[in-house]
Amino acid sequence: MTAPDDSLRVFAGYAMKRAFNAIQADLNATLQPFGLRMVTFSALAVIGAHSGLRQSALADVLAIERPNLVLIVDELERADLIVRDRATDDRRAYDLRLTLLGRRVLDKARGAVADHDARMCAGMTAQDKDTLAQTLRTIELNGRRDNDRRTLPRA
Amino acid sequence: MTAPDDSLRVFAGYAMKRAFNAIQADLNATLQPFGLRMVTFSALAVIGAHSGLRQSALADVLAIERPNLVLIVDELERADLIVRDRATDDRRAYDLRLTLLGRRVLDKARGAVADHDARMCAGMTAQDKDTLAQTLRTIELNGRRDNDRRTLPRA
DNA sequence: TATTGTTATACTCTATAACTATA
DNA sequence: TATAGTTATAGAGTATAACAATA
Protein backbone atom coordinates (compact mmCIF):
# COMPACT_ATOMS: atom_id res chain seq x y z
CA MET A 1 0.00 0.00 0.00
CA THR A 2 3.01 2.31 -0.19
CA ALA A 3 3.08 4.09 -3.55
CA PRO A 4 6.06 6.10 -4.83
CA ASP A 5 4.06 9.31 -4.54
CA ASP A 6 2.65 8.71 -1.06
CA SER A 7 4.35 11.83 0.23
CA LEU A 8 2.28 13.88 -2.23
CA ARG A 9 -1.03 12.02 -1.97
CA VAL A 10 -1.71 13.70 1.36
CA PHE A 11 -2.17 17.03 -0.46
CA ALA A 12 -5.56 17.76 -1.98
CA GLY A 13 -3.95 19.62 -4.89
CA TYR A 14 -1.89 16.66 -6.03
CA ALA A 15 -4.76 14.18 -5.81
CA MET A 16 -6.95 16.66 -7.66
CA LYS A 17 -4.51 17.24 -10.48
CA ARG A 18 -4.34 13.50 -11.11
CA ALA A 19 -8.11 13.05 -10.95
CA PHE A 20 -8.68 16.08 -13.14
CA ASN A 21 -6.25 14.85 -15.77
CA ALA A 22 -8.19 11.59 -15.92
CA ILE A 23 -11.49 13.43 -16.27
CA GLN A 24 -10.17 15.80 -18.90
CA ALA A 25 -8.81 13.01 -21.07
CA ASP A 26 -12.06 11.07 -20.94
CA LEU A 27 -14.19 14.17 -21.42
CA ASN A 28 -12.27 15.39 -24.44
CA ALA A 29 -12.57 11.94 -26.01
CA THR A 30 -16.29 12.04 -25.22
CA LEU A 31 -16.76 15.45 -26.85
CA GLN A 32 -14.64 14.86 -29.93
CA PRO A 33 -17.48 13.27 -31.97
CA PHE A 34 -19.44 16.50 -31.46
CA GLY A 35 -16.56 18.70 -32.56
CA LEU A 36 -16.41 20.15 -29.06
CA ARG A 37 -13.77 20.61 -26.38
CA MET A 38 -14.27 21.04 -22.65
CA VAL A 39 -14.37 24.80 -22.87
CA THR A 40 -16.52 25.03 -26.03
CA PHE A 41 -19.02 22.62 -24.47
CA SER A 42 -19.12 24.77 -21.33
CA ALA A 43 -19.69 27.93 -23.35
CA LEU A 44 -22.40 26.25 -25.41
CA ALA A 45 -24.17 25.02 -22.25
CA VAL A 46 -24.14 28.46 -20.62
CA ILE A 47 -25.42 30.14 -23.80
CA GLY A 48 -28.14 27.48 -24.00
CA ALA A 49 -29.23 28.24 -20.45
CA HIS A 50 -28.94 32.03 -20.85
CA SER A 51 -29.90 32.95 -24.39
CA GLY A 52 -28.78 36.44 -25.32
CA LEU A 53 -25.99 36.86 -22.83
CA ARG A 54 -22.94 38.81 -23.91
CA GLN A 55 -19.36 37.78 -24.41
CA SER A 56 -18.04 39.66 -21.42
CA ALA A 57 -20.75 38.09 -19.24
CA LEU A 58 -19.90 34.65 -20.58
CA ALA A 59 -16.20 35.24 -20.01
CA ASP A 60 -17.04 36.25 -16.45
CA VAL A 61 -19.17 33.17 -15.80
CA LEU A 62 -16.54 30.77 -17.12
CA ALA A 63 -13.60 32.68 -15.60
CA ILE A 64 -11.99 33.06 -19.02
CA GLU A 65 -10.14 36.18 -20.18
CA ARG A 66 -12.10 38.15 -22.78
CA PRO A 67 -9.49 37.85 -25.54
CA ASN A 68 -9.46 34.08 -25.19
CA LEU A 69 -13.23 33.86 -25.26
CA VAL A 70 -13.30 35.60 -28.64
CA LEU A 71 -11.62 32.58 -30.21
CA ILE A 72 -14.00 30.18 -28.46
CA VAL A 73 -17.04 32.11 -29.72
CA ASP A 74 -15.45 32.25 -33.18
CA GLU A 75 -15.12 28.48 -33.12
CA LEU A 76 -18.75 27.92 -32.09
CA GLU A 77 -19.97 30.42 -34.66
CA ARG A 78 -17.92 28.86 -37.46
CA ALA A 79 -19.51 25.50 -36.60
CA ASP A 80 -22.97 27.11 -36.88
CA LEU A 81 -23.77 26.25 -33.27
CA ILE A 82 -24.32 29.86 -32.14
CA VAL A 83 -24.85 33.31 -33.64
CA ARG A 84 -23.62 36.75 -32.60
CA ASP A 85 -26.62 39.12 -32.72
CA ARG A 86 -25.85 42.82 -32.44
CA ALA A 87 -27.42 43.98 -29.16
CA THR A 88 -30.25 46.48 -29.73
CA ASP A 89 -29.47 48.61 -26.69
CA ASP A 90 -25.66 48.67 -26.95
CA ARG A 91 -24.12 48.58 -30.37
CA ARG A 92 -20.74 47.54 -29.04
CA ALA A 93 -22.08 44.24 -27.69
CA TYR A 94 -23.35 40.96 -29.09
CA ASP A 95 -26.21 38.78 -27.82
CA LEU A 96 -25.12 35.16 -28.05
CA ARG A 97 -27.78 32.61 -29.02
CA LEU A 98 -27.88 28.95 -29.99
CA THR A 99 -28.83 28.01 -33.53
CA LEU A 100 -31.22 25.09 -34.03
CA LEU A 101 -28.19 22.96 -34.78
CA GLY A 102 -26.53 24.30 -31.64
CA ARG A 103 -29.51 23.24 -29.54
CA ARG A 104 -29.50 19.76 -31.06
CA VAL A 105 -25.74 19.32 -30.60
CA LEU A 106 -25.86 20.66 -27.04
CA ASP A 107 -28.63 18.25 -26.05
CA LYS A 108 -26.80 15.26 -27.47
CA ALA A 109 -23.42 16.32 -26.12
CA ARG A 110 -24.95 16.91 -22.70
CA GLY A 111 -26.23 13.33 -22.67
CA ALA A 112 -22.77 12.05 -23.59
CA VAL A 113 -21.19 14.18 -20.87
CA ALA A 114 -23.69 12.83 -18.32
CA ASP A 115 -22.66 9.31 -19.32
CA HIS A 116 -19.01 10.28 -19.03
CA ASP A 117 -19.66 11.72 -15.58
CA ALA A 118 -21.37 8.53 -14.44
CA ARG A 119 -18.44 6.51 -15.80
CA MET A 120 -15.89 8.59 -13.91
CA CYS A 121 -17.92 8.44 -10.71
CA ALA A 122 -18.55 4.70 -10.89
CA GLY A 123 -18.26 3.10 -7.47
CA MET A 124 -19.22 6.27 -5.61
CA THR A 125 -22.36 6.51 -3.50
CA ALA A 126 -24.81 9.35 -3.99
CA GLN A 127 -23.58 10.75 -0.70
CA ASP A 128 -19.96 10.56 -1.88
CA LYS A 129 -20.87 12.56 -4.99
CA ASP A 130 -22.67 15.08 -2.86
CA THR A 131 -19.72 15.49 -0.53
CA LEU A 132 -17.40 15.81 -3.53
CA ALA A 133 -19.48 18.62 -5.05
CA GLN A 134 -19.66 20.35 -1.69
CA THR A 135 -15.94 20.10 -0.90
CA LEU A 136 -14.94 21.24 -4.40
CA ARG A 137 -17.14 24.30 -3.95
CA THR A 138 -15.60 24.97 -0.55
CA ILE A 139 -12.09 24.79 -2.02
CA GLU A 140 -13.02 27.10 -4.89
CA LEU A 141 -14.45 29.65 -2.48
CA ASN A 142 -11.49 29.38 -0.12
CA GLY A 143 -9.27 30.17 -3.09
CA ARG A 144 -11.38 33.14 -4.10
CA ARG A 145 -11.29 34.52 -0.58
CA ASP A 146 -7.51 34.22 -0.47
CA ASN A 147 -7.13 35.90 -3.84
CA ASP A 148 -9.25 38.80 -2.69
CA ARG A 149 -7.16 39.15 0.42
CA ARG A 150 -4.04 39.35 -1.70
CA THR A 151 -5.49 41.72 -4.27
CA LEU A 152 -7.14 44.05 -1.77
CA PRO A 153 -4.97 44.03 1.34
CA ARG A 154 -7.20 45.06 4.28
CA ALA A 155 -9.65 47.05 2.16
CA MET B 1 -29.22 30.00 -5.32
CA THR B 2 -29.37 29.88 -9.14
CA ALA B 3 -25.95 30.65 -10.60
CA PRO B 4 -25.32 31.27 -14.31
CA ASP B 5 -23.34 28.04 -14.57
CA ASP B 6 -25.80 25.81 -12.69
CA SER B 7 -26.22 23.61 -15.75
CA LEU B 8 -22.50 22.78 -15.54
CA ARG B 9 -22.13 22.51 -11.77
CA VAL B 10 -23.80 19.10 -11.85
CA PHE B 11 -20.74 17.69 -13.61
CA ALA B 12 -17.78 16.64 -11.47
CA GLY B 13 -15.35 17.74 -14.19
CA TYR B 14 -16.53 21.33 -14.23
CA ALA B 15 -16.56 21.69 -10.45
CA MET B 16 -13.13 20.14 -10.34
CA LYS B 17 -11.62 22.42 -12.95
CA ARG B 18 -12.76 25.45 -10.96
CA ALA B 19 -11.53 24.06 -7.64
CA PHE B 20 -8.24 22.99 -9.19
CA ASN B 21 -7.66 26.42 -10.70
CA ALA B 22 -8.11 27.93 -7.24
CA ILE B 23 -5.68 25.45 -5.70
CA GLN B 24 -3.12 25.92 -8.43
CA ALA B 25 -3.12 29.70 -8.13
CA ASP B 26 -2.69 29.58 -4.36
CA LEU B 27 -0.10 26.81 -4.51
CA ASN B 28 2.06 28.55 -7.09
CA ALA B 29 1.96 31.73 -5.00
CA THR B 30 2.92 29.60 -1.98
CA LEU B 31 5.88 28.00 -3.77
CA GLN B 32 7.23 31.11 -5.49
CA PRO B 33 9.37 32.19 -2.50
CA PHE B 34 11.15 28.84 -2.76
CA GLY B 35 11.75 29.20 -6.49
CA LEU B 36 9.49 26.19 -7.05
CA ARG B 37 6.39 25.44 -9.12
CA MET B 38 3.79 22.75 -8.58
CA VAL B 39 5.61 20.24 -10.72
CA THR B 40 9.12 21.01 -9.51
CA PHE B 41 7.92 20.69 -5.91
CA SER B 42 6.34 17.33 -6.75
CA ALA B 43 9.53 16.10 -8.39
CA LEU B 44 11.62 17.30 -5.46
CA ALA B 45 9.32 15.54 -2.98
CA VAL B 46 9.45 12.23 -4.84
CA ILE B 47 13.25 12.39 -5.16
CA GLY B 48 13.43 13.18 -1.45
CA ALA B 49 11.36 10.11 -0.63
CA HIS B 50 13.17 7.85 -3.13
CA SER B 51 16.79 8.87 -3.32
CA GLY B 52 18.54 7.48 -6.37
CA LEU B 53 15.52 6.92 -8.57
CA ARG B 54 15.92 7.52 -12.27
CA GLN B 55 14.39 10.07 -14.57
CA SER B 56 12.21 7.59 -16.38
CA ALA B 57 10.94 6.22 -13.06
CA LEU B 58 10.22 9.74 -11.84
CA ALA B 59 8.42 10.57 -15.08
CA ASP B 60 6.35 7.45 -14.63
CA VAL B 61 5.43 8.27 -11.02
CA LEU B 62 4.38 11.83 -11.86
CA ALA B 63 2.72 10.89 -15.17
CA ILE B 64 4.95 13.32 -17.07
CA GLU B 65 6.40 12.63 -20.50
CA ARG B 66 10.13 11.95 -20.38
CA PRO B 67 11.11 14.88 -22.62
CA ASN B 68 9.24 17.29 -20.37
CA LEU B 69 10.81 15.88 -17.24
CA VAL B 70 14.28 16.63 -18.60
CA LEU B 71 13.57 20.36 -18.33
CA ILE B 72 12.18 19.95 -14.81
CA VAL B 73 15.26 18.07 -13.68
CA ASP B 74 17.44 20.67 -15.43
CA GLU B 75 15.68 23.38 -13.45
CA LEU B 76 16.16 21.60 -10.10
CA GLU B 77 19.78 20.86 -10.90
CA ARG B 78 20.52 24.44 -11.94
CA ALA B 79 19.08 25.57 -8.59
CA ASP B 80 21.46 23.14 -6.80
CA LEU B 81 18.54 21.29 -5.25
CA ILE B 82 19.37 17.92 -6.82
CA VAL B 83 22.24 16.19 -8.60
CA ARG B 84 22.34 13.74 -11.49
CA ASP B 85 24.68 10.88 -10.53
CA ARG B 86 25.68 8.50 -13.30
CA ALA B 87 24.21 5.10 -12.37
CA THR B 88 26.95 2.54 -11.65
CA ASP B 89 25.11 -0.37 -13.23
CA ASP B 90 23.73 1.38 -16.33
CA ARG B 91 25.78 4.14 -17.89
CA ARG B 92 22.81 5.52 -19.79
CA ALA B 93 20.90 6.35 -16.60
CA TYR B 94 21.15 8.89 -13.80
CA ASP B 95 20.42 8.43 -10.10
CA LEU B 96 18.65 11.53 -8.84
CA ARG B 97 19.47 12.72 -5.33
CA LEU B 98 18.76 15.76 -3.20
CA THR B 99 21.61 18.07 -2.28
CA LEU B 100 21.79 19.36 1.28
CA LEU B 101 20.21 22.57 0.03
CA GLY B 102 17.55 20.52 -1.73
CA ARG B 103 16.69 18.76 1.52
CA ARG B 104 16.43 22.04 3.39
CA VAL B 105 14.29 23.69 0.70
CA LEU B 106 12.05 20.63 0.40
CA ASP B 107 11.41 20.54 4.15
CA LYS B 108 10.52 24.20 4.29
CA ALA B 109 8.44 24.13 1.13
CA ARG B 110 6.60 21.07 2.38
CA GLY B 111 5.58 22.99 5.49
CA ALA B 112 4.33 25.88 3.39
CA VAL B 113 2.39 23.49 1.16
CA ALA B 114 0.82 21.86 4.22
CA ASP B 115 -0.29 25.33 5.35
CA HIS B 116 -1.66 26.04 1.88
CA ASP B 117 -3.55 22.76 1.94
CA ALA B 118 -5.11 23.57 5.32
CA ARG B 119 -6.10 27.01 3.99
CA MET B 120 -7.80 25.56 0.92
CA CYS B 121 -9.59 22.93 2.98
CA ALA B 122 -10.77 25.35 5.65
CA GLY B 123 -14.31 24.58 6.71
CA MET B 124 -14.09 20.90 5.85
CA THR B 125 -14.37 18.15 8.46
CA ALA B 126 -11.76 15.43 8.72
CA GLN B 127 -14.31 13.07 7.26
CA ASP B 128 -14.95 15.43 4.34
CA LYS B 129 -11.23 15.49 3.56
CA ASP B 130 -11.13 11.72 3.78
CA THR B 131 -14.05 11.33 1.41
CA LEU B 132 -12.46 13.85 -0.96
CA ALA B 133 -9.19 11.92 -1.09
CA GLN B 134 -11.09 8.68 -1.61
CA THR B 135 -13.37 9.96 -4.36
CA LEU B 136 -10.48 11.64 -6.21
CA ARG B 137 -8.62 8.35 -6.18
CA THR B 138 -11.71 6.55 -7.46
CA ILE B 139 -12.07 9.01 -10.32
CA GLU B 140 -8.39 8.70 -11.23
CA LEU B 141 -8.65 4.92 -11.31
CA ASN B 142 -11.89 4.98 -13.28
CA GLY B 143 -10.07 7.09 -15.84
CA ARG B 144 -7.13 4.74 -16.00
CA ARG B 145 -9.40 1.75 -16.48
CA ASP B 146 -11.17 3.50 -19.35
CA ASN B 147 -7.91 4.49 -20.99
CA ASP B 148 -6.66 0.91 -20.82
CA ARG B 149 -9.87 -0.32 -22.37
CA ARG B 150 -9.43 2.10 -25.23
CA THR B 151 -5.72 1.42 -25.74
CA LEU B 152 -5.95 -2.36 -25.47
CA PRO B 153 -9.37 -3.34 -26.82
CA ARG B 154 -10.30 -6.70 -25.24
CA ALA B 155 -6.70 -7.79 -24.66
C1' DT C 1 -13.32 58.43 -19.52
C1' DA C 2 -14.97 53.67 -19.46
C1' DT C 3 -16.49 49.48 -21.72
C1' DT C 4 -17.19 45.75 -25.65
C1' DG C 5 -15.07 43.18 -28.58
C1' DT C 6 -10.84 42.49 -30.90
C1' DT C 7 -5.80 41.78 -32.37
C1' DA C 8 -1.30 40.61 -31.41
C1' DT C 9 1.70 38.45 -28.53
C1' DA C 10 4.06 35.77 -25.12
C1' DC C 11 4.54 32.33 -21.76
C1' DT C 12 3.45 27.84 -19.78
C1' DC C 13 2.07 23.08 -20.21
C1' DT C 14 1.83 19.08 -22.75
C1' DA C 15 2.63 15.61 -26.53
C1' DT C 16 5.35 13.37 -30.36
C1' DA C 17 9.16 12.21 -33.38
C1' DA C 18 13.76 11.47 -33.80
C1' DC C 19 18.42 11.50 -32.24
C1' DT C 20 22.81 9.59 -29.05
C1' DA C 21 24.79 6.48 -26.21
C1' DT C 22 24.48 2.72 -24.12
C1' DA C 23 22.41 -2.00 -23.17
C1' DT D 1 16.67 -4.45 -31.01
C1' DA D 2 15.41 -1.95 -27.07
C1' DT D 3 16.00 1.56 -23.41
C1' DA D 4 17.66 6.23 -20.92
C1' DG D 5 18.13 10.59 -21.64
C1' DT D 6 17.91 14.30 -24.84
C1' DT D 7 16.61 17.74 -28.60
C1' DA D 8 13.44 20.04 -31.38
C1' DT D 9 8.98 21.23 -32.20
C1' DA D 10 4.10 21.89 -32.29
C1' DG D 11 -0.25 22.32 -30.08
C1' DA D 12 -3.16 23.62 -26.47
C1' DG D 13 -4.28 26.87 -22.59
C1' DT D 14 -3.73 31.17 -20.48
C1' DA D 15 -2.45 36.11 -19.58
C1' DT D 16 -1.49 41.13 -20.85
C1' DA D 17 -1.23 45.37 -23.62
C1' DA D 18 -3.25 48.11 -26.89
C1' DC D 19 -6.59 49.33 -30.38
C1' DA D 20 -11.46 50.72 -32.70
C1' DA D 21 -16.14 51.52 -31.98
C1' DT D 22 -19.37 52.88 -28.87
C1' DA D 23 -21.18 54.38 -24.44
Image (tube, coloured by chain):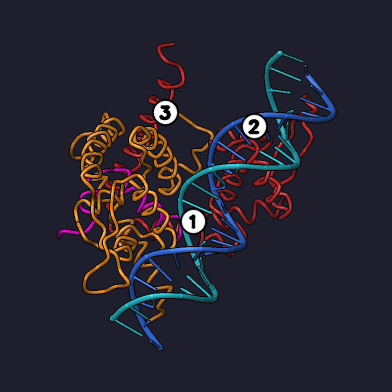
Chain colours: A orange, B red, C blue, D cyan
Q: Which residue is mark 2?
A: B56
Residue at image location 35% in from the left, 53% down from the top: B19
User: Which residue shows up at 24% across the image and 62% down it?
Assistant: A53
Q: Quadrant of the C terminus of chain B?
A: top left
Magenta region: B1-26
Q: Nearer the viewer, mark 2 or mark 1?
A: 2
Label 3 packing within 10 angstroms: few (<14), some (14-19), many (20+) = some
Query: Furthest-left residue in view?
Result: B1
Q: As shown in the figure, which amino acid type bears the numbered disc 1?
A: Val
Question: Does residue B19 lie above or below B64 as drawn?
Answer: below
Q: Secondary structure at mark 2?
A: helix
Q: Who is closer to the viewer here, B43 or A74?
A: A74
Residue B90 in the image: x percent, y percent? 77, 25
Within 10 Å of disc 2 (Cα), the crowding (few <14, some 14-19, many 20+) is some
Q: Earlier in the sequence, mark 1 or mark 3?
A: 1
Q: At 34% across and 49% down in the image, what residue appears?
A: A76
Q: For the residues tagged 3 and 2, is the chain the same?
A: yes
> In this view of the protein, which residue sits in the foreground, A59 or A22?
A59
Nearer mark to the viewer, of 1 and 3: 3
Q: Which residue is mark 3?
A: B144
- Along the viewing direction, whichever of A97 and A131 lies nearer the viewer: A97
Residue A83 quadrant? bottom left
Predominant SS along the magenta part: helix
Instruction: Identify the mark nearer the N-term, 3 or 2.
Output: 2
- Left/right placement of residue B112 relative to residue B94 reads left
